[in-house]
Amino acid sequence: MGKLSLRLLQLIHSKKSKQPCLVNRLHYASGYTQQDAGFSLLELIAVMVIIGILSAIAAPGWLAFVNRQELNKANEVVLATLQEAQREAKNKKLSYSVSFQKNTTTQNVEVAVYRTDAVTSTWTWKPLGADVGANSKKLLLGTNLSGENTANTVDPLVSYTLSASKKITFDYMGTLPNASFGTPIAPSTEPPGLKIVVAVPSSVNSTSASSVKRCVIVKTLLGSMITAKDDKCG
């Protein structure tokens, strides 16, 4: 009996003596984990460099996308404005005109719809596309109009340096009186029509148009219109 008791006491003492070692191991492991948590400065710098490279690659594509969206909105307004003038002419049995200009003071592309016989001072000019979130200051306005309802026949056919506003007029039936749609350019056999163009400025020269363009083309005496883009706009 005495030998059994002595053996139990020895086992208990042995287990107690091993507990500190286990505690020390756990403490050591915990300290190691805390020291290695987070990122080193070198790792953060590497991540920032990668983000910068990806941003530089993505930025031009994003800018081009934004520019195309601006153009699409502005061109939709050009079409809607021409259709509004045509509709007013039919409904009121009067001639209505649409004029376009680049305001040299505000740099906005502007549009006005009015009765053809209205006094110039009563015209209401509005920035093109302002109602739909388009910033017309970023855009160039071009047209092949040399006069009222008359397409230019002198190269370049489309001009982006307008010295005065350009006008398209619909008569009381919504048609275009005395219109001249220009001379066909080979290989096409159709006249180019009356073009109103909005374009992104060239990165080299802000007064010249880039290849990114949108336009509305009035094609016939009945006032039919189509939209086109880029090289189709001239």
Image (spheres, helix red, strand yellow):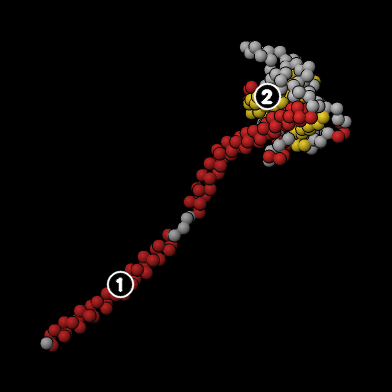
Q: Which of the two residues, 174 or 183, is positioned nearer the viewer here?
A: 174
Question: Is residue 169 something that shows in the picture?
Answer: no
At which x and y percent is residue 56?
Answer: 57, 40
Q: Which of the two residues, 169 or 58, is positioned nearer the viewer here?
A: 169
The answer to which of marks 2 and 1 sits earlier in the sequence is: 1
- Secondary structure of the residue carrying tag 1 is helix
- The 10 Å Cα crowd at callout 1, few under 14, some 14 to 19, many 20 or more, is few
Q: Is residue 55 left or right of residue 193?
A: left
Q: Which of the two residues, 30 or 179, is positioned nearer the viewer here?
A: 179
Point 71% across, 13% down: residue? 183
Q: Residue 8: which quarter of the image?
A: bottom left
Q: Is residue 189 left or right of residue 102?
A: left
| Residue hosting label 1 | 21
Q: Residue 191: which quarter of the image?
A: top right
Q: Amino acid at mark 1?
A: Cys
Q: Please say if the residues under marks 2 and 1 sit with CB atoms less than 8 Å apart.
A: no
Distance Cα–Cα, label 2 vs label 1: 89 Å
Q: Is residue 62 left or right of residue 87?
A: left
Point 64% across, 33% down: residue? 72
At which x and y percent is residue 143?
Answer: 73, 24
Question: Is residue 2 something that shows in the picture?
Answer: yes
Q: Residue 126: which quarter of the image?
A: top right
Residue at the bottom extreme?
2
Point 46% across, 58% down: residue? 38
Q: Which of the two residues, 138 or 14, is positioned nearer the viewer here?
A: 138
Q: Is residue 210 left or right of residue 151?
A: left
The C terminus lies in quadrant: top right
- Secondary structure of the residue carrying tag 2 is strand
Mark 2, mark 1: which one is toward the viewer?
2
At which x and y percent is residue 22?
Answer: 30, 71
Q: Which mark is residue 225?
A: 2
The N terminus lies in quadrant: bottom left
